[in-house]
Image (cartoon, rainbow, N blue to C red):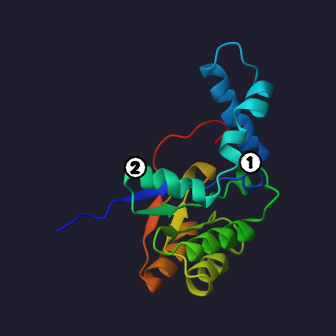
Amino acid sequence: MGFLIVDSHTHIWERDWLPEAFWRGFSSVIKHLIPGMTEEEVMRNVMPVFWHSPPEELLAEMDEAGIEKAVILPLDWGLRLGEPKLSVEELNRRFAEIGKQHPDRFLPFVGVDPRRKNAVELLERGLGEWGMAGLKLHPTSGFYPNDPICYPLYRKCEEYGVPVLIHTGTELPPS
């Protein structure tokens, strides 16, 4: 009997998929790890490594590590850090498409801030129409997982019989 090795938490990022404030905060942390490098140099020379992550690169890394499947998670920090160029709906649709292109390797979750007016509708669309596999909540974007604003999302996940993944650790600035 063999084991199925699953990475239960990974991301595919493009620059336009997250708010600029996220990238600036991330670069300010990296700046402190590389002596003598300014934040602008980090933005120009280091951050592009994170901005071009096509699924094929992740698949190659998974193959090298012996990972058979990965849960891919879009992040919605727009209400806290400012909206990125790509809308949260389009971001989730793209993750669903990546999952459909590689159904044997990726399990895309819906990522949505429960405070969005259309959060339940977006989750419903992701789970129903797009066939996504669960919900990712990131409370560092400005809410608590026990806040009643989350309950309609939890009920929708219960209705579909899908898991909810909640970030519970610390977060880099500016989150």
Q: Nearer the viewer, residue 97 or 2?
A: 2
Q: Is residue 9 left or right of residue 90?
A: left
Element under disc 1: helix
Q: Nearer the viewer, residue 89 or 166?
A: 89
Query: Does residue 46 sit above or below 171 in this rendering?
Result: above
Element under disc 2: helix
Proximity of marks 1 and 2: CB atoms separated by less than 8 Å? no
- Residue 118: image quadrant is bottom right
Badge 2 density bin: few <14, some 14–19, many ≥20, Cα 10 Å: few
State the image coordinates of residue 117 (x, y, percent, origin top left). 72, 72
Give the mark nearest the N terminus, 1 or 2. 2
Q: Pointer 2: what residue?
A: 65
Q: Nearer the viewer, residue 12 or 75?
A: 12
Q: Is residue 21 left or right of residue 152?
A: right
Type of amino acid under label 2: Ala
State the image coordinates of residue 96 (x, y, percent, origin top left). 61, 73
**Residue drawn at x 72%, y 18% as measured from the top left:** 37
Q: Is residue 144 visible?
A: no
Q: Pointer 1: what residue?
A: 81
Type of amino acid under label 1: Leu
- Residue 131: image quadrant is bottom right
| C-alpha separation, residue under disc 1 versus residue under disc 2 | 33 Å
Q: Is residue 169 visible?
A: yes
Which quarter of the figure is the N terminus placed in? bottom left
Q: Is residue 136 left or right of residue 129?
A: left
Which quarter of the figure is the C terminus placed in? top right
State the image coordinates of residue 51 (x, y, percent, origin top left). 71, 47
Of the residues tagged 1 and 2, which is closer to the observer?
2
**Residue drawn at x 74%, y 36% as measured from the top left:** 24
**Residue drawn at x 64%, y 74% as measured from the top left:** 97
